[in-house]
Structures are given as structure tokens and as C-alpha cells.
């Protein structure tokens, strides 16, 4: 049975080649998944697609919404 999960992805984007200056922020995703693990993976895939140049991603699946 699938549920709608809430997941947050922390994204770090570097400016320039040396990555001395970086921008860190979080984005919230609602994903339909079978488990917390698959919800995190789906949120990560969406973040990677939306921010392909990011240097780091960190996913937190927080709760079931439905």
C-alpha cells in the first residue's frame, strides 16, 4: 500500500570551481511511495533533476501525510 510521504532535501550548490562560496538550502517534497526508503529515493531523484549542478544532497523523510 502506498502513502504520501513528506521529505526534505538539503541541497548544497558551489559557486566556482574551488567551491569556496556555497549556497545551502532545503526543499520540501511530497512523494507517493511504498516505504520511507523509496520515498527518500524519489525525493532525491526529483532534487537531482531540478538541481543537477548541486554538489551535495541530504534527504530526510519526516512523516506520512496520507
Image: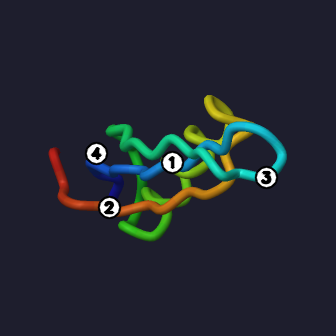
Give the alpha-carbon distance from disc 2 to disc 3, as whole Å.
31 Å
Could you say where residue 31 lies in the image, as x and y percent from the top left?
A: 39, 42
Choose the circle earlier in sequence order: 3 or 4: 4
Q: Disc 1 designates what residue?
A: 11
Q: Nearer the viewer, mark 2 or mark 3?
A: 3
- Which mark is nearer the camera, 3 or 1? 3
Which residue in the structure is indicated by mark 4?
4
Determine the residue positioned at 22% across, 60% down.
62
Residue 24 is situated, as x and y percent measured from the top left of the image, at 45, 46
In the rendered image, which residue does mark 2 sit on? 61
Q: Are marks 3 and 1 in contact (CB under 8 Å)?
A: no
Mark 4, residues whose alpha carbon is within 10 Å: few (<14), some, or many (≥20)?
Answer: some
Q: Mark 1, mark 4: which one is toward the viewer?
A: 1
Mark in front: 1 vs 2: 1
Image quadrant occupied by the N terminus: bottom left
Q: CA distance from mark 3 to mark 4?
A: 39 Å
Q: Position of residue 16 (x, y in %)?
A: 77, 39
Numbered disc in front, either 2 or 4: 2
- In depth, the one of 39 and 8 nearer the eye is 8
- Per the image, the residue denoted by label 3 is 18
Crowding at dot 1, Cα within 10 Å, few <14 / some 14-19 / many 20+, comes out as many
Amino acid at each position: 500500500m502506498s502513502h504520501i510521504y513528506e521529505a526534505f532535501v538539503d541541497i548544497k550548490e558551489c559557486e566556482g570551481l574551488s567551491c569556496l562560496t556555497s549556497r545551502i538550502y532545503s526543499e520540501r517534497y511530497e512523494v507517493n511511495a511504498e516505504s520511507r526508503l523509496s520515498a527518500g529515493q524519489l525525493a532525491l531523484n526529483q532534487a537531482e533533476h531540478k538541481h543537477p549542478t548541486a554538489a551535495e544532497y541530504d534527504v530526510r523523510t519526516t512523516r506520512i501525510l496520507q
